[in-house]
Image (cartoon, rainbow, N blue to C red):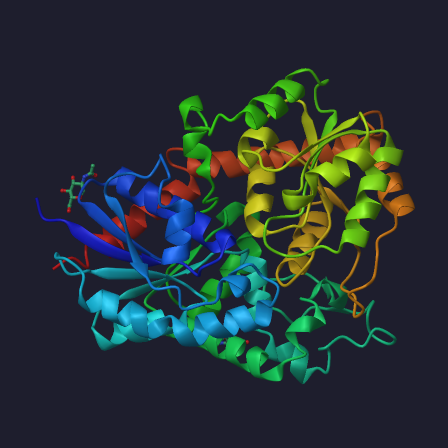
Amino acid sequence: MAMNHVVAVPHPGRGHINPMMNLCKQLVSKNDTILITFVVTEEWFGLIGSDPNKPDRIRFATIPNVIPSEMVRSKDLLGFMEAVATKMGAPFERLLDQLEPPSPSLIVTDTFLLWAFDAGNQRNIPVASFWPLSALAFSVFYHFDRFLENGHYPVNFQESSHERVNYIPGVNAMSLMDLPPPMMATKQEILKKTFKMFSWVPKVQYFLLHTTYELESQVIDALKRNLSKQIYPIGPAIPYFDLGDSSTTFASDEDVNYLRWLDFQPCGSVLYVSLGSFLPVSSAQMEEIAAGLCESGVRFLWVARGETERLSKVCGGKGLVARWCDQLRVLCHPSVGGFLSHCGWNSICEGVFAGLPFLTFPIAVDQFPNCKLIVEDWKIGLRVKEFMVENMAYLVTREKISGLVTRFMDLESNEVKEMRRRAKELQGICQYSTSKGGSSETNINSFIRDVILSNSH
Ligand SMILES: *[C@@H]1O[C@H](CO)[C@@H](O)[C@H](O)[C@H]1NC(C)=O
Ligand SMILES: *[C@@H]1O[C@H](CO)[C@@H](O)[C@H](O)[C@H]1NC(C)=O
């Protein structure tokens, strides 16, 4: 049987690798002639190489750890982006030239990796760009020049912070407060490089979006008009297809504990709290969140990496603090009624899939525009952290957190009932898109038929 070989290369961050892997799993599950080489650094291979759910037709290939570990662990986001942009290209090309046959008929690359486009173009291998974030975030970056031309970036807090602009095609009037925070602007060089990356998108052959068409149709339609190429919204690329299979959870004692704990809580009563695994939150802010959660009296499950012991002490009896959890499984648990999130795109997709409303607590980059989507467009959330702040030492106080958490989890309030009703509606749309005949499933099938199979030699 002639195999169709695809090389997939994600940006080396968890929020990028996971959706790329989930997309690849879907691709191989739909046609048994598809073979995927999934390219990661050795460090990442150590972290994900033993995934028990990885199908045989996805095989890993590694490039050396060209990026220092401390950068991978995020203390220096700009340095990390710079290293990814300059250090990974050469080893990737070497790997591409030494792959076992059949020779690849397509490269699927994260949109952030310019060098993968170059490598493909030089070898006459078609390239599909995969954008792992929201379509809204893409549009904001892609049209970023317009903020600069209008003197709207970096935002002048005294004068224009409450101003709304509507010059981004397909995006309703948007507050300047929802732009990515100014840390991006402090290094003009990086900003320029980032723009260069986006100016390449019109040149790629195929464009995949990690979103559901119906949830961002206005933005996607505007992008289609601008890019005049086929766009494939294939989201949510989250592991819903692993959900039914309980053998796939890593059943440690800790897992069993939080799942059993959830089983004993009233329906819809638990607030799930996670601020992601990548970007740092100051310990003063963690302290305020912990105190705010306690004061609210609301039941909560908080996943907080390294600080579980300290936070458990602050939090007392109503909440559970865990080091890790199977997030999608937890979000889909009937006891969970809301999600306090940093608004990373994967978390949003999982929350929407689970039918939950959000308390938004953005930390960086695309997470700010994502809040607009949740609060203003979808109307399924309240803002905890309201805007980007110049001063990163800015704290959301415990009083504010506790007030909002109480309001958000009050099952008697009409505001909350309405938000939960909307969230269920979006859940229906999102889940339908992945089912037979739904938009995402149809797009994945067309991508396989029109791109992967038709490009084979
Ligand atoms: C996979 O693609 C091949 C064409 O390369 C086709 O003949 C086959 O029917 C497809 N298999 C499935 C399961 O769709
Ligand atoms: C697409 O958007 C870019 C960036 O804002 C702009 O420069 C370009 O003129 C637009 N093209 C079309 C055809 O609208």
Residue 153 horizontal/vertical position (percent): 71, 77
Foreground: 238 or 77? 77
Find the residue positioned furthest to the right. Answer: 399
Quarter of the rendering containing residue 398: top right
Foreground: 155 or 81? 81
Q: Is residue 169 visible?
A: no
Foreground: 205 or 50? 50
**Residue occupying image coordinates x 72% and y 28%:** 270
**Residue occupying image coordinates x 23% and y 66%:** 96
Find the residue positioned furthest to the top. Answer: 264
Above-or-below relation of 341 to 174: above
* Rendered-image quarter of ligand 1: top left
Locate the N terminus and report the quarter of the image it occupies: top left
Residue 197 falls left or right of residue 362: left
Q: Is residue 288 visible?
A: yes
Residue 446 horizontal/vertical position (percent): 30, 49
Foreground: 294 or 444? 294
Residue 265 horizontal/vertical position (percent): 71, 18
**Residue occupying image coordinates x 50% and y 59%:** 221
Residue 341 horizontal/vertical position (percent): 68, 45
Locate the C terminus and report the quarter of the image it occupies: bottom left
Above-or-below relation of 364 to 321: below
**Residue occupying image coordinates x 58% and y 37%:** 324
Residue 309 falls left or right of residue 334: right
